[in-house]
Amino acid sequence: AFIKPDYDGPDQLDWFHDIGIKSLSNKSLYDSFCLSECKVTDKSLFPELNLASDVIIPTPWQPERILNNLGTIGHNRPCGSFKQDFDNHLIVYTYPLMIGWVGGGNHSIMQGIIGGHGILKPEEVYDITSIINKVTFDGIVWRDSDNKSIGHPRYPEIGWVWEIAKSISKLESSPYKD
């Protein structure tokens, strides 16, 4: 499907938009809430994400680049082992979803994932534990505490990960909160 000329996938994911909670996708709410309460500012706390084992979601969008990169990145390959290019690779990490959302470098990051080698350091980290229990995914839409529909995720799997993250947040304390 990716190499067909009419492929119309997204060229990047935006975690805040793609989660799809309408009351959270409001720009002013994002600015006031997530940038002040959720954004982790201490970069020394940022995790290293392993392309072989962590959930990192690239969206390779250009068929020619997908094909041209196949087999070129990795140990003993023409472009060598995967190395993060901070001018190209943009990763936003969300905890406790434990997802690295790729906003740049999709094609090379995808090759690193396929090869199972490489480490990425996120550019931004958001700890959304303060909102995770306020919203429920019912399999189709997001529901607030009054059971009112407040949007739907781009992909239902995001909603299921959200529900798993609720359990994680109950079992362990956030590494980003005091």
Image (cartoon, helix red, strand yellow):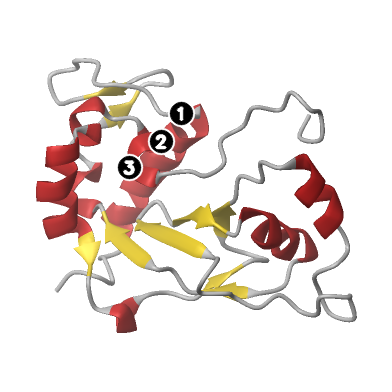
As measured in the structure, the alpha-carbon distance from the residue carrying label 1 to the one carrying label 3 is 11 Å
Secondary structure of the residue carrying numbered label 3: helix
Mark 2 lies on a secondary structure that is helix
Q: Position of residue 71 (x, y in %)?
A: 88, 63
At 74% from the left edge and 67% from the top edge, which residue is drawn? 116
Checking the image for residue 12, the label placed there is none
Please name whichever residue, 91 or 158, is drawn nearer the observer in this view of the structure: 91
Tell me where residue 136 appears, x and y as whole percent.
28, 29
Farthest bottom residue in view: 44
Quarter holding the C terminus?
Answer: bottom left
Mark on residue 18?
2
Looking at the picture, which amino acid does disc 1 mark?
Answer: Arg
Query: Is residue 57 found left or right of 162 in the rendered image?
Result: right
The answer to whether residue 12 is above or below residue 51 is above
Contact flag, marks 3 and 2 (Cβ < 8 Å): yes
> Residue beneath label 3, please?
16
Mark 1 and mark 2: span between their CA atoms?
Answer: 5 Å
Kindly identify the residue that appears in the image at 71 percent across and 65 percent down: 112
Residue flagged by tag 2: what amino acid is it?
Answer: Asp
**Residue linked to disc 1:** 154
Seen at 79% across and 65% down, the residue is: 115
Dot 1 crowding, Cα within 10 Å, few <14, some 14–19, many 20+: some
First reached walking from the N terminus: tag 1 or tag 2: 2
| Position of residue 67 in the picture relative to residue 37 (left or right) | right
Q: Secondary structure beneath disc 1? A: loop
